[in-house]
Image (spheres, grey):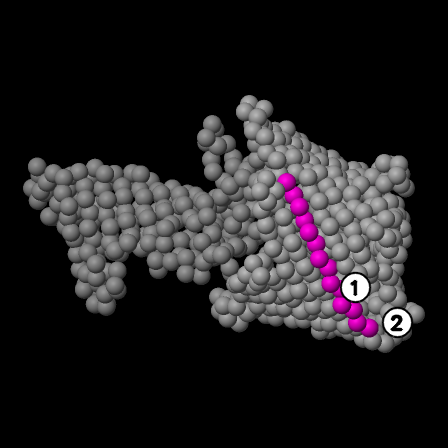
Amino acid sequence: MGRGRRAVGAAIVVLVLAATAAAQTRRPLTDAERQPVTFTAGEVEYDENRDLVIARGGVEAWQGDRILRAREITFHRPTGRATARGDVVLMEPDGQVFFAEEAELAEDLRDGVVRELRSLLAEGGRLAAAGAVRSGGRVTEMARAVYSTCEACPRDPERAPLWQIRADRVVHDEQEKTVEYFDATMQIAGIPVLYLPYFWHADPSVKRKSGLLFPEFGTSTFLGAFYRQPYYWVISPSEDATISPMATARKGAVLFGEWRRRFNAGFATVSGSVTYDPDETRWRGNLVSTGRFSLDETWRAGWDVQRSSDRSYLRRYRIGALSNASLLVSTPFVEGFGANFYARADANVYQGLGSLDVARRIPLVLPRLYGEVTGTEALLGGRWRGDLGVFATTRQTGTATRRIASRLNWALPLRGAAGDLWTVEANLDVLGYQVGGDTDATPIPGGRAGAAARAHPQIALTWRWPLLRPGGSWGSQVIEPILQAVAGPKAGRDPRIPNEDSVDLEFSDAYLFGFNRFPGRDRLDGGFRVNAGLRGAWFLDGVTIEGLFGQSWRAATDSLYPAGSGLEGRRSDYVGRLTVIPSDHLALTYRTRLDRDTFATRLADLSATVSAAGRSLTLSYLSAPSQPDTLQAGPRREIGATLGGRLWGNWTGFVGARRDLVREAMVQSYAGVRYEDECFAFVATYQRRFTSSAVGGAGTDLIFSLVFKTVGEFGLSAL
């Protein structure tokens, strides 16, 4: 051992380096500097002549929450500086990890000069540089740096990542949470695709930061070429906004905006757009808003607002999901939830976007009140529930309706001696109307000016006998005959009462049993009728077969039911359902309605889904007759198919189409692919609408989106 040197074996050493350096410069100590540097090493050598402490062999030094590791670390006691060599690792208190071949660090291990730097940031971000200078404990300036969030290829680590950003100089500010690039080039698979003299993005550890987002550009038949540049503004920890001006070649400028804020009791969002159309010489735009607020543990309030300046604006300017909307609904509401009750007060403002919608005939529903309560104690041994609702509709042209409706229901379940199940039910509907306005100009059926009221009591007796047969290896079979008798006064078609909520009548297996087959209460089932059905099921190991077939009889015909509904005679059409699931990879469902006399198919709804290895194919067929008194004015026959799922590796996709067999024309086709890994996502979607009657109108959409994780999203559209 030379003169002035002393060596020891493995040791834990505590050095007060920073305090010495701070005392020499006569400056106050920071909290970090008040803590000593502690390190462990396989061997420690002290050079008295140069006042150096040299640690070798798996050295680990720490001061506070900052940790430094290297094969060798030399501490200069007078200045407090440390020089680390060989497999250097510096772990910051915020979770960032820096790797280097050599580093010279200042007294508190925060600042210094690093050679061959590699850093691991939050969210998988990776920075590498030929050299770096760290100052102020917050800014790292790197030379000839590369940034990416892509992991190295395990089979070929030297291969270029899927994407990376190379720059002559990169500045990472940990306090401002930004990463700045100077003379930067974006490379994809090692191929340069974009050069930028300067740009920056938020530190990967930051979830929200103000700044420019990646732009979106493309072309549209209506707009021509367009460019949209969003700016994201963080107003506060609970509030932000996005402002997106868009320039178009044919329609001038459009301004988009979105504001969001979260409160202690809820949240509110507002988004919209505005533009001046030079061809139509008018302002156009839209507004969308949503709010939800908890008033207490039982009650909450909120709103949904959807408005557009005209019927074609959303579709032509491609305003998000609303571009395919046919109806806009705005609803403010207050509602309450309890253990045995529900109450709601709201209003509905409608805006029709269809070519046949007439604004003066579209109703305003204000107010609409509804309350429902379920008995907590048995009444005459049975369960009871009641509700009360009030609504008022007004139109500029057409019927104005005021209605109060209440329903009281009581049900008593019983068990027979043979295992059969009985249910005795009673139901009472009480309704009152005040009808005004121009009843001759209304688009809805029925309605006569004046007051009207009705009380409609009904009773029902339902019997079902589920018979179960265990079959061992052949599984279990269930046969369940169901018979229901319902009695009440004949309802008929009352010309005094307008039909506001019971227009869309659909008779199927789902509505075979019950007191009322109409979706609302302006039209009510009545008279004496018997509903009968047979349900069967077969359950094997991994196989399920289940079905229902039935019919309804009534004592007298009723003019209430429109032609083609399947209920217009004393005997209804036959309705049925069959579900077959032979394995986890196949599911078949068929619903039908058969003519009561000829057994001809009047309604057929078939769907089949085949799935395997993360892929699925869904086929559908629908055939429905014309129902002139309902929303369906003509017959429908349509087929559709969708194939989707995993393609290979990180790729997924889908493709599908719908075709109208009545017009012998395509309705819609669509396709899409998606690639996603730990650092990148690519999405391409295509949609073509062949007829103007399709939702969103005729047209073609082609949208590309590229997401460079932690950097931004880039979009291209062709509409």
Q: Disc 1, disc 2: CB below 8 Å?
A: no
Q: Earlier in the sequence, mark 1 or mark 2?
A: 2
Q: What's the mark number on residue 560?
A: none
Residue found 58% across the figure and 42% down from its top: 417
Based on the picture, tell me whether residue 4 belongs to the magenta stretch.
Answer: no
Residue found 8% across the figure and 37% down from its top: 1
Asked if 112 appears above or below 592 in the picture, the reply is below
Q: Pointer 1: what residue?
A: 522
**How far across and down, in percent of the image, does residue 703 sit?**
70, 46
Q: Nearer the viewer, residue 341 or 71?
A: 341
Left or right of residue 98: residue 284: right
Kindly tell me whether residue 524 is visible in this rendering.
Answer: yes
Q: What's the mark number on residue 448?
A: 2
Q: Nearer the viewer, residue 94 or 413?
A: 413
Magenta: predominant secondary structure element? strand
Q: What's the residue type where badge 1 is placed?
A: Asp
Residue found 89% across the figure and 73% down from its top: 438
Q: Which residues are magenta?
A: 452-465
Based on the picture, tell me whether residue 456 belongs to the magenta stretch.
Answer: yes
Q: What's the residue type where badge 2 is placed?
A: Arg
**How far across and down, in percent of the image, does residue 356 sit?**
88, 60
Circle 2 packing at 10 Å, graded few (<14), some (14-19), many (20+), is: many
Circle 1 packing at 10 Å, graded few (<14), some (14-19), many (20+), is: some
- Disc 1 from disc 2: Cα separation: 13 Å
Q: Nearer the viewer, residue 491 or 585?
A: 491
Left or right of residue 486: residue 371: left
What kind of element bears circle 1? Answer: loop
Q: In which quarter of the view is residue 137 placed?
A: bottom left
Q: Residue furthest top?
A: 473
Kindly tell me whether residue 234 is visible in this rendering.
Answer: no
Q: Residue furthest right?
A: 440
